[in-house]
Amino acid sequence: MEYEAFEDLEKGGGALRTVKDLSAGAAGGIAQVLLGQPFDIVKVRLQTTTQYSSALDCATRIFKNEGPLAFYKGTLTPLIGIGACVSVQFGAFHEARRRLEALNQKKYADSSLSYGQYYMAGGFAGITNSVLSGPIEHIRIRLQTQPHGAGRLYNGPIDCIKKLSAHEGVLRGLFRGQAVTYLREIQAYGMWFLTFEYLMNQDAKRNNVKRDEISSLKVAAYGGLAGEALWLSSYPFDVIKSKMQCDGFGEQRQFTSMRDCFKKTYAVEGLGGFWRGLGPTLLRAMPVSAGTFAVVELTMRALG
């Protein structure tokens, strides 16, 4: 699908376009958290412990032992943070896309992006977003996996930030698992945006319509499929990230590095260990990603 955004850059409209991208992304991020948080806590529990036999067993025991509100443990941090993350994702993606379109227009007199370039723009969005998503997800995982009741380690996100920073400092404590987060974000969002753009472009070409004429239902469906592609292509990285971010400190620490975590996971759990919790993740991905893209697309259309 061709865009004319490079003209905006030349005419001084790039700043306004970026504000619109960020606003649409923030709206999509809020929808993403509210739709996906119950699925996410089940995913994290399955990734980081072997005490549950299945996703259903995990969800049932959380509900029975901790109550229905437990499915929204640690929601405050992602509600604020993921809104910012998705805002950055879409802002960075569209900025990279516009730059690539301008480069193509100058070099080839055709602004259309190749699908490799869509992946590059998505990967840029991921690496930009990772600075926020790494610590935000670390806090969420700590809150989701801490013992229930009297054994609680953290009284909330602020207390969690203080204690993580006190253990090893801000960079080593709060940003634990950041290297594998970079790898996950590049691959995940490269595939996410690539898949969505491919499906949208094919629909527009097949039906001879403009992008903004594609129905909201189709936008949601393509967004949902993009969500499945995101997780299928990056899930092992996510498992390692979760394991490292719920690991202990000092003598209780199990993993010394990302490479060590990969080795030990394979030694103990085999290849299947890199895919634990995939079921609820894919179940979550469809509605969450569908809602995110639908809200973002509708917001961008409304903003013009």
Image (spheres, rainbow, N blue to C red):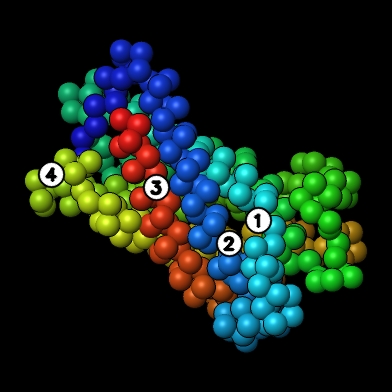
- Amino acid type for the residue under numbered disc 4: Val
Q: Secondary structure at mark 4?
A: loop
Total marks drawn? 4
Name which of mark 1 and mark 2 comes first in the sequence.
2
Name which of mark 4 and mark 1 comes first in the sequence.
1
* Rendering coords of residue 38 (x, y %): 58, 67
How far apart in space, not on screen, are marks 1 and 3 (Cα)?
Answer: 20 Å
- Amino acid type for the residue under numbered disc 1: Thr
How far apart in space, not on screen, are marks 3 and 2 (Cα)?
Answer: 17 Å
- Near mark 2 (Cα within 10 A), the count class, few <14, some 14-19 or many ≥20, is many
State which mark lies toward you, 3 or 4. Answer: 3
How far apart in space, not on screen, are marks 3 and 4 (Cα)?
Answer: 20 Å
Q: Which mark is residue 295?
A: 3
Q: Residue at x 18, y 28 (%)?
A: 110
Is residue 297 rendered to the left or right of residue 54?
left
- Amino acid type for the residue under numbered disc 2: Gln
